[in-house]
Amino acid sequence: MLNGLPYLSAGAGPALIVLLHTPQAASPTGLARWSTMRLVRPFTKHFTVYVVTRPPGLPPATTMADLAAVHAQAIAATFEGPVKMLAISTGGAIALQLAADHPDLVDRLVLAGTAGTLGPIGRRAQRAYIKRARQGRRPSPALAEIVTESPIGRRLLKGLLWLSDGGHQDYTDAITVLNAEDGFDLRGRLHDIKAATLLIQGDKDVVYPLELARQTVEGIPDARLLVYPGRSHDRTFTDRRFAPDALAFLTGR
């Protein structure tokens, strides 16, 4: 535990905090662990990477500010001075809130697939996910529309996502975080972020559309936007340019 937060760590060098979205409030296991480590492996050559997850059992009314405060407390208690941070999707929303509320804790910030608030398609898909989970149904098929625009692709993907959920999982913590993200809107406070910031965004991202990403970068005093043409939400993070671009910024090259 990192001051009460589940985490994975790997690599050597200065700390790099990584915030992702995980359905469970626990360190990823199995295929999720493999894909997480594949994502962060290039960064372990330069940093000690800490993939930090939220604690289990958060109150249902938890807000993004509450989540940011929990992470900020762990960072302040564990590390000396401000840290570098890599944050993706929902993790990016937490990082934005943290950097605005606790500017002394973040030195450099790389974001991907995120913005100061959700887009309408992302919000609709996440609300459908929450509704299915509360009904006791496997929720992930609700996310098919944010992965592909193809009607045939969506039908096929819904089946795969249904299988990926497995059975009898507890989605209480996931619902709490997605509700917090649904209410997240930092657009009026972006100027409070003091960290040098890079936002990497695919121009086909429908969860956090490019226009919202542009508004986010325009609101942060020291921020840059890097756009990957033709890339959707998920394909932004798996693009071969992603790790080199993020590393160049984090290391100041």
Image: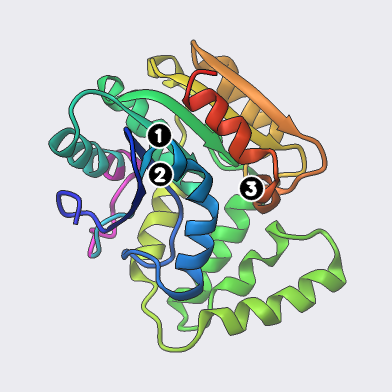
Q: Residue at x 44, y 14 (%)?
A: 191
Q: Residue furthest top?
A: 221
Q: Residue 151, relative to residue 63: is it above or below? A: below
Local SS, label 3: loop
Question: Does the CB distance between marks 2 and 1 fall below 8 Å?
Answer: yes
Q: Position of residue 24 (x, y in %)?
A: 37, 67
Q: Does residue 114 appear to the left or right of 97 in the view shown?
A: right
- Can residue 14 be seen? yes
Q: Is residue 57 left or right of residue 219?
A: left
Q: Which mark is residue 18?
A: 2
Q: How would you rate the neighbour count of disc 1 (Cα within 10 Å): few for under 14, some for 14-19, many for 20 or more?
A: many
- Up the image or down, 150 lies above or below 17; here it is below
Which structural element holds mark 2?
strand
At horizontal 63% and vertical 65% (from top left) the residue drawn is 143
Give yes or no for contact between labels 2 and 3 (Cβ–Cβ under 8 Å).
no
Label 2 amino acid?
A: Val
Q: In the image, which disc is placed on residue 207?
A: 3
Instruction: Give the residues in magenta.
Output: 57-67
Residue 183, given in percent of the width and then of the height, sits at: 43, 44
Which residue shows up at 28% across the image and 60% down it? Answer: 60
Residue 93 located within the stretch drawn in magenta:
no
Residue 130 in view, yes or no: no
Give the residue pinned by disc 1: 85
- Label 2 and label 1: CA atoms lie apart by 6 Å
Which circle's residue, 2 or 3, is located before the other in the chain?
2
Dot 3 amino acid type: Val
Q: Nearer the viewer, mark 3 or mark 1?
A: 1
